[in-house]
Image (spheres, grey):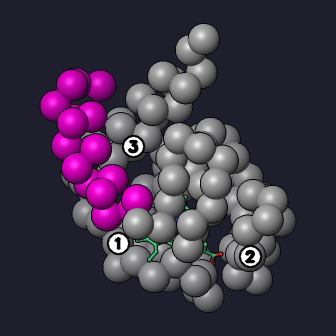
Amino acid sequence: MAEGDIKNGEKIYQKCRFCHILNQPANRMGPHLMQLQERKAGTIEGFQYSAAMKQAGENGLIWNDATLKEFLTAPKTMIPGTTMRFWGLWEGQIDDLLAYINAQAEAASKP
Ligand code: HEC
């Protein structure tokens, strides 16, 4: 991924950070997003998910580039009943955002 994409992704992440922490296992209005890739939906301990999000995880929803794209484009279309109050991003923004989130996860996994 190009450097510019990650930089732009960091800007886009400002829309998420009010509710989500990316680098620490602490919840805000939303669950933390550490190690988000390959995580089963609705499984962070101590966070009060909606029944809809828990059900989506039980039905096998795993977060990865493809499922995050679908969710972040239109949260309530993918998971009707989710309590995430977010109107959605458009596709180019999501690519940059995922580049940033993935780079953060990579940095965190280095010693
Ligand atoms: C106004 C607060 C708010 C904003 C802004 C917000 N979220 Fe959320 N998010 C939530 C809440 C609340 C949930 C839990 C939803 C549920 O249980 O249905 C959630 C859930 C999620 C999940 C599922 C997590 C899991 O453990 O299954 C992901 C992924 C996510 N948000 C990503 C994002 C990203 C990326 C952004 C920015 C583009 C964002 N959110 C913006 C409040 C927010």
* Figure quadrant of residue 80: bottom right
Q: Secondary structure at mark 1?
A: loop
Location of residue 50 with respect to 107 vertically, above or below = below
Q: Position of residue 30 (x, y in %)?
A: 57, 68
Label 2 is placed on what type of residue?
Answer: Gln
Mark 3 surroundings within 10 Å by alpha-carbon count, few (fewer than 14), some (14 through 19), many (20 or more)? many
Between 106 and 64, the residue placed more toward the observer is 106
Label 1 is placed on what type of residue?
Answer: Gly
Whether ligand 1 has any atom under 8 Å from the Cβ at mark 2 is answered as yes
Q: Position of residue 11 (x, y in %)?
A: 22, 50
Mark 2 surroundings within 10 Å by alpha-carbon count, few (fewer than 14), some (14 through 19), many (20 or more)? some
- Residue behind mark 1: 88
Distance from disc 2 to disc 3, alpha carbons, whole Å, reads 25 Å
- Residue behind mark 2: 48
Q: Secondary structure at mark 3?
A: helix
Check if residue 81 falls in the magenta segment.
no
First in sequence: mark 1 vs mark 2:
2
Distance from disc 1 to disc 3, alpha carbons, whole Å, reads 14 Å
Q: Nearer the viewer, mark 1 or mark 2?
A: 2
Label 3 is placed on what type of residue?
Answer: Leu
Quarter holding the N terminus?
top left
